[in-house]
Image (cartoon, coloured by chain):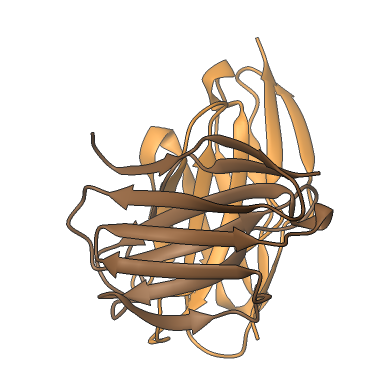
């Protein structure tokens, strides 16, 4: 079975600070990796995903994530955060080729950006 | 209406009540999902449907009964729930379940409180 760990439950940053949110997964096979974001009062939405190719993935709003297979990690980064990035961020994984497209989510990281 | 909608947005019920949650997707997708989001726990997959057939029942108690009459609608019928079932119930859809890296689109959720 897969599992996902997000070690930072709460992060508080000032605007313009750099962001890195950790995500580690446990699974022995080939995986797809996702970061979803939930802005206050809004739906969960996809930020970016990795399924093959370049391990450095660029998403919306200046976010990127790097898949490091040897470390079972898929950390999310942004060089300079804005107040509007205040949200909860979820890392998720599924096994490539799994029937049902079933996602396993991490516990989420709440990011607060102070203006 | 666009995307994934859920009704009701809030529901309070007693342990002996019977109620239903409704989800509708307007994206032409063939797969739909129910997730449970409890406080301080990761998002948990409950059920997966593909073309109205259940693909996965993730060891969910029988007091939760899903129904998928067509590829656009998904219900979650609730009966004799327990207070620990209080949570945010999220519906999602994706193009299908065959491509494991397909994005899932989420609804706003139903906030359920069981008294």
Residue A104 visible in the current orientation: no
Q: Is residue A75 left or right of residue B40?
A: left
Q: x, y (%) of residue B100?
A: 36, 76
Q: Colour of chain A?
A: orange
Q: Residue at x 53, y 20 (%)?
A: A84
Height in image: B54 above or below B30?
below
Taking depth in this image into account, of A35 and B58 the one nearest to the observer is B58
Q: x, y (%) of residue B94?
A: 31, 62
Total tally of numbered discs in the picture: 0
Q: Residue at x 25, y 58 (%)?
A: B72
Taking depth in this image into account, of B63 and A43 the one nearest to the observer is B63
Q: Quadrant of residue A113?
A: top right
Q: Is residue A6 left or right of residue B64?
A: right
Q: Is the C terminus of chain A in the top left, top right, bottom left or bottom right quadrant?
A: top right
Q: Is residue B113 left or right of residue B27?
A: right
Q: Residue at x 79, y 55 (%)?
A: A7
Residue B68 visible in the current orientation: yes
Q: x, y (%) of residue B41?
A: 76, 56
* Outermost residue toward the bottom in this view: A28
Q: x, y (%) of residue B70?
A: 24, 66
Judging by colour alone, the chain drawn in brown in this rendered image is B
Q: Residue at x 65, y 86 (%)?
A: A1
Taking depth in this image into account, of A106 and B89 the one nearest to the observer is B89
Q: Quadrant of residue B29?
A: bottom left
Height in image: A53 above or below B92?
below
* Outermost residue toward the left in this view: B28
Height in image: A98 above or below A34?
below
* Outermost residue toward the top in this view: A115
Height in image: A40 above or below B52?
above
């Amino acid at each position: 079975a897969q599992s996902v760990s997000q070690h930072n439950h709460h992060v508080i940053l000032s605007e313009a600070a750099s962001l890195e949110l950790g995500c580690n997964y446990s699974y022995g096979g080939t995986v797809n990796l996702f970061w979803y974001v939930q802005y206050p009062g809004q739906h969960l939405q996809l930020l970016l995903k990795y399924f093959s190719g370049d391990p450095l993935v660029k998403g919306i709003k200046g976010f990127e994530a790097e898949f490091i297979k040897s470390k079972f990690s898929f950390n999310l980064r942004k060089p300079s955060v804005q107040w509007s990035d205040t949200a909860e961020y979820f890392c998720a994984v599924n096994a490539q080729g799994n029937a049902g497209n079933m996602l396993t989510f991490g516990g989420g990281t709440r990011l607060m950006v102070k203006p | 209406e666009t995307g994934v909608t859920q009704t009701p947005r809030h529901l309070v019920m007693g342990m002996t009540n019977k109620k239903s949650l409704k989800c509708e997707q307007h994206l032409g997708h063939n797969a739909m999902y129910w997730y449970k989001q409890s406080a301080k726990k990761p998002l948990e997959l409950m059920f997966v449907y593909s073309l109205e057939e259940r693909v996965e029942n993730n060891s969910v108690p029988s007091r939760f009964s899903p129904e998928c009459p067509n590829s656009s609608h998904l219900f979650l019928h609730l009966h004799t729930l327990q207070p620990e079932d209080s949570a945010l119930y999220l519906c999602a859809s994706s193009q299908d379940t065959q491509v494991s890296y397909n994005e899932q689109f989420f609804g706003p959720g139903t906030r359920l409180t069981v008294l």
